[in-house]
């Protein structure tokens, strides 16, 4: 129970009990019992929501509904490229499943834990590298249990397991999928996930700039390549702080033994990696060598004038059945191929004097990690304005500006400022949350609203300027009249609409 109350930042919530149902029928029984007794329950699939609350419920007193035992892969179709999973299926498990079958399909993976839930990540509208990286945009036929114990299916799923259920997103009539993602309106017990064919040619594209004033031009070039379809997958860009934090131990000597590592101190180290300030990674996924060559030419033409360095790495030809195009030793290349790995998780231990252990347990090891997820228009001007905010506020609160942003869609960037610290150092928890709150407030004021909330930020949004909140209130009352399911989770009912 104590572990269920522990995140990677300070929490005061108490968890009185943990329920571990193994079937949908047991989930229904749990919810009916909870409603009968007016006890709040909080579902998690795998609970690796690091930086955003781990397994900790938003409100104190919730019984944790741990869905990890619902871990079956219920259906798989190689030809039509889809798989149906329960909440406990992890990225690693699905990867192994496809590999063992020698499948020509793959699921893009996240920078998070290989033990995270595919379904949980999709419900949170998480993202991965590679085709179909906007995960929630590539799932269908959700099965959801309501707080009343009733069960509904989205899309064509309501007509049973017919041929269309795993293939068509919208079905016919109102599309209900969105009600169950980033919400507290149901417990999702299964979901169909679309898989993409492995590319016949995969080229990693790495690029970098030294002069930060080139950032806007680089970002605008990436948008052109995303919009015209040359790049079919996300482009990720990391600053030098973020890169350093994932690569090795904290530079205690350069920091004079005392964090934060200042910009002049980091600049003195910059010779070690050639002095680049921003590093980018994307890939060309192509069905043939000819297609890859054409796209590569286009990337060179559009991107090269705006960066200091762009280079391509790739293997050609058909991968062996179930094998990989690249080797499995470079985390960045594994990431692009959907191979789950722990490479970027080391950054959670950056400020720990002993570094990352072989088996990572960030909550137990008192790693401090607080994330926030501002959304920024895919434009050089906007991303520069958003970066300045973090570069200004994070050091002012005693933290390095660890920054990454991802062009997951054609029109928006997800900026990811990570506040990383050591929870064992007195006062750091409070400073980290003050930094989070200041960043969230500033980004909301600038219109760079978050696309995802952690338990620490559920109350941080500005009020709606229309009748959104009152509609949400009525929907919640209709499906959960006693209010037992995940109180406080994306639940803005406590707020009043501004002009509704
Ligand atoms: C270094 C680092 C890198 C990361 N990189 C990425 C990344 O690249 N992309 C990314 O998306 N995330 C990333 N994350 C964030 C996070 O680790 C992942 O999003 C992870 O997938 C979330 O954990 P989970 O899948 O176990 O979901 P869970 O913790 O199981 O679920 C998340 C939340 O969704 C709700 N929920 C879960 N299951 C259900 C259900 N069945 N019904 C109703 N509600 C439910 C719950 O409120 C739960 O708290 C990263 C984190 C770190 C620390």
Image: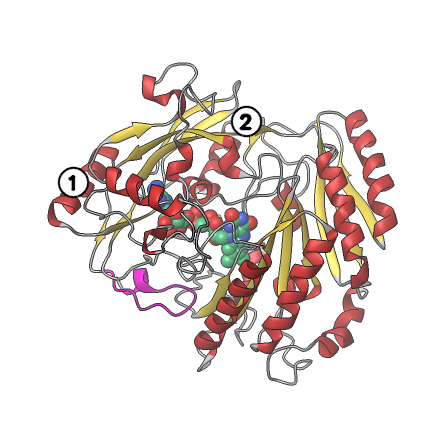
User: Badges 2 and 1: C-beta atoms under 8 Å apart?
Assistant: no
The boundaries of the magenta stretch are 2-15
In the rendered image, the quadrant that contains the N terminus is bottom left
* Left-right relation of 78 to 146: right
Q: Residue furthest front?
A: 499
Q: The residue tagged with tag 2: helix, strand or loop?
A: loop
Q: What residue is drawn where x is 17% and y is 52%?
A: 39
Q: The residue tagged with tag 1: helix, strand or loop?
A: helix
As displayed, is residue 13 above or below residue 108? below
Task: Judge by depth and name the residue closer to the eye, 2 or 101.
Answer: 2
Which circle, 2 or 1, is nearer the viewer? 1
Report the disc number at residue 448. none
Name the residue tied to disc 2: 103
Is there any visible trace of residue 188 in the rendered image? yes
- Identify the image quadrant of residue 390: bottom right
Q: Is residue 439 magenta?
A: no
Indicate the position of residue 279 as horizontal and vertical percent values.
Answer: 73, 56
Indicate the position of residue 212 as horizontal and vertical percent values.
Answer: 78, 63
Task: Judge by depth and name the residue closer to the eye, 56 or 461.
Answer: 461
- Identify the image quadrant of residue 296: top right
């Amino acid at each position: 129970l104590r572990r269920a109350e522990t995140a990677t930042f300070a929490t005061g919530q108490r968890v009185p009990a943990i329920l571990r149902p193994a079937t949908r029928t047991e989930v229904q029984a749990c919810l009916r019992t909870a409603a009968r007794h007016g006890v709040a329950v909080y579902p998690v699939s795998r609970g690796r929501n690091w930086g955003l609350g781990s397994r900790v419920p938003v409100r104190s007193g919730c019984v944790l509904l741990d869905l990890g035992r619902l871990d079956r892969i219920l259906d798989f179709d190689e030809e039509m490229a889809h798989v149906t999973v329960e909440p406990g299926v992890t990225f690693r498990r699905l990867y192994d499943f496809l590999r063992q079958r020698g499948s020509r399909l793959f699921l893009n993976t996240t920078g998070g834990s290989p033990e995270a839930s595919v379904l949980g990540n999709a419900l949170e509208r998480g993202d991965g590298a590679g085709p179909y990286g906007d995960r929630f945009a590539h799932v269908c036929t959700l099965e959801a249990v309501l707080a009343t114990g009733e069960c509904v299916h989205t899309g064509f799923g309501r007509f049973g397991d017919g041929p269309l259920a795993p293939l068509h997103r919208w079905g016919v009539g109102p599309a209900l999928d969105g009600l169950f993602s980033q919400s507290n309106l149901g417990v999702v017990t299964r979901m169909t996930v679309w898989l993409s064919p492995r590319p016949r040619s995969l080229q990693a594209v790495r690029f970098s700039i030294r002069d930060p004033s080139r950032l806007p031009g680089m970002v605008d070039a990436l948008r052109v390549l995303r919009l015209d379809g040359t790049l079919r997958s996300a482009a990720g860009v990391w600053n030098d702080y973020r890169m350093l934090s994932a690569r090795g131990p904290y530079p205690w000597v350069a920091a004079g033994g005392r964090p934060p590592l200042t910009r002049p101190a980091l600049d003195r180290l910059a010779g070690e990696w050639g002095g680049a300030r921003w590093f980018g990674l994307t890939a060309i996924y192509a069905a043939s060598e000819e297609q890859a060559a054409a796209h590569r030419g286009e990337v060179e033409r559009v991107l090269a004038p705006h960066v200091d360095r762009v280079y391509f790495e790739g293997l050609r030809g058909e991968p062996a059945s179930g094998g990989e195009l690249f080797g499995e030793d470079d985390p960045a290349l594994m990431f692009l191929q959907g191979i789950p790995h722990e490479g970027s998780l080391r950054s959670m231990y950056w400020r720990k004097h002993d570094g990352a252990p072989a088996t990572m347990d960030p909550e137990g090891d008192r790693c401090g990690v607080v994330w926030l997820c501002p959304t920024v228009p895919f434009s050089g001007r906007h991303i520069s304005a958003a970066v300045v905010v973090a570069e200004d506020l994070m050091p002012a609160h005693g933290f390095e500006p660890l920054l990454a942003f991802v062009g997951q869609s054609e029109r928006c960037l997800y900026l990811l400022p990570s506040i990383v610290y050591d929870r064992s150092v007195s006062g750091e928890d409070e400073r980290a949350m003050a930094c989070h709150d200041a960043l969230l407030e500033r980004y909301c004021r600038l219109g760079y609203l978050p696309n995802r909330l952690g338990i620490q930020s559920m109350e941080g949004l500005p009020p709606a300027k229309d009748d959104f909140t009152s509609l949400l209130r009525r929907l919640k009352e209709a499906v959960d009249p006693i209010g037992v399911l995940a109180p406080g989770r994306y639940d803005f009912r406590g707020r009043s609409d501004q002009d509704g």
